[in-house]
Image (cartoon, grey):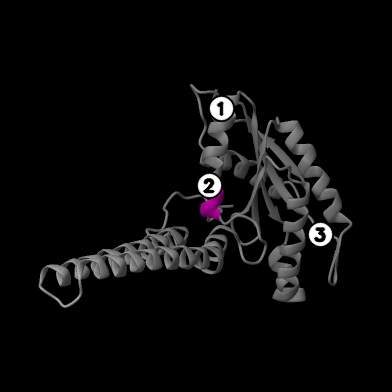
Amino acid sequence: MGHHFLHQNRRRYDPRHLPRLLHFALTSVLVTFAGLTTLIGWWADTSGGIATAPVLFRAIAMEVVLVFVLGIVARLLLLRFVIFPLHRKATYDDLTDLLRPGSFWDEAECFIEQAAGDGVPVAFAFLDLDDFKQVNDTYGHATGDMLLKAFSQLLAQNARATDIVGRLGGEEFGWLMRGADDQDARQAVLRVLEVCQSMCVGSIAGFTFSAGVVSDKPDLNKVPRAWDLARRADEGLYQAKAEGKARIVITDPPDTVGA
């Protein structure tokens, strides 16, 4: 199947870093401005200007307070109208409102490490909509987008608060479940599949997807990488497609392959 998301070459430029850089730039500008005005005041005082020292001290103090207040206001405005929107746009997919691939994989690594510390299993489900290209060719890309949105909302509704769900490619999705073995994960994915088969989206009366599921119980001595779980789930997905689609295949965890 060769899913294009299964690679670890990250872009050097990550848009999720932009809000942090803007915040740092604003803070640097305000601190620099306050420092320069203070130095100018001291220079005016020591260079024999007409202003007396008390007047200069009061002016400098008022300016420092003003810069401090303006800094707080500017920071709040920047957070509210620039940083938060940019962070959300960089973290979540615009169409589906699910995690973007980069954010998903970063959170998945922390997710598995926490599960290892707590001694609970994790399950990875890799889902791919069946015949999605045919949907776009038959009904148009607008309907295809509607289908992606509807499916994403369904995944989000069925995922627990402790789960992670992301859009990993065009019609490819990842679902990482905490405290679930392979049968628990299969039942969760099967519930979604049964709803999809009877769901109407625009002109489409029912649709399906195929999925691969893998489960592992990490511990502090053996913490599997999210990529390794994804590759095993991808193999199950490939098998599900080959066997006729609209089905879920469970595969063994990475450490048991070839054993």
Q: Is residue 64 visible from the viewing direction of this image?
A: yes
- Image quadrant where one finds the C terminus: top right
Q: Are the residues at dot 1 and dot 3 in contact (C-beta closer than 8 Å)?
A: no
206 relative position to 171: left or right: right
- Amino acid type of the residue tagged 3 in the rendering: Phe
Compared with residue 230, is residue 17 higher up or lower down, i.e. above or below? below
> Foreground: 135 or 95?
95
Q: Which mark is residue 116?
A: 1
Q: Quadrant of residue 235?
A: top right
The residue at 16%/69% (across/down) is: 45
Stretch in magenta: 101-106
Q: Secondary structure at mark 2?
A: helix
The quarter of the displayed image where residue 123 is located: top right
Amino acid of disc 2: Trp
Q: Nearer the viewer, residue 199 or 79?
A: 79
Disc 3 and disc 2: Cα gap in Å?
A: 27 Å
Label 2, label 1: how far apart the Cα atoms are: 17 Å
- Identified by mark 1, the residue type is Ala
Q: Earlier in the sequence, mark 1 or mark 3?
A: 1
Which of pointers 3 and 2 lies earlier in the amino acid sequence? 2
Is residue 245 among the parts visible in the rendering? no
Which dot, 3 or 2, sits closer to the camera?
2
Instruction: Tell me the number on the disc at residue 65.
Output: none
The residue singled out by tag 2 in the image is 105
- The residue carrying mark 3 is 207
**Under tag 1, what secondary structure?**
helix
Q: Is residue 241 magenta?
A: no
The chief SS type of the magenta part is helix
Instruction: Looking at the picture, tell me which residue is in the foreground, 133 or 58.
Output: 58
Q: Is residue 254 left or right of residue 38?
A: right
Pinpoint residue 79: horizontal percent, then vertical percent.
52, 63
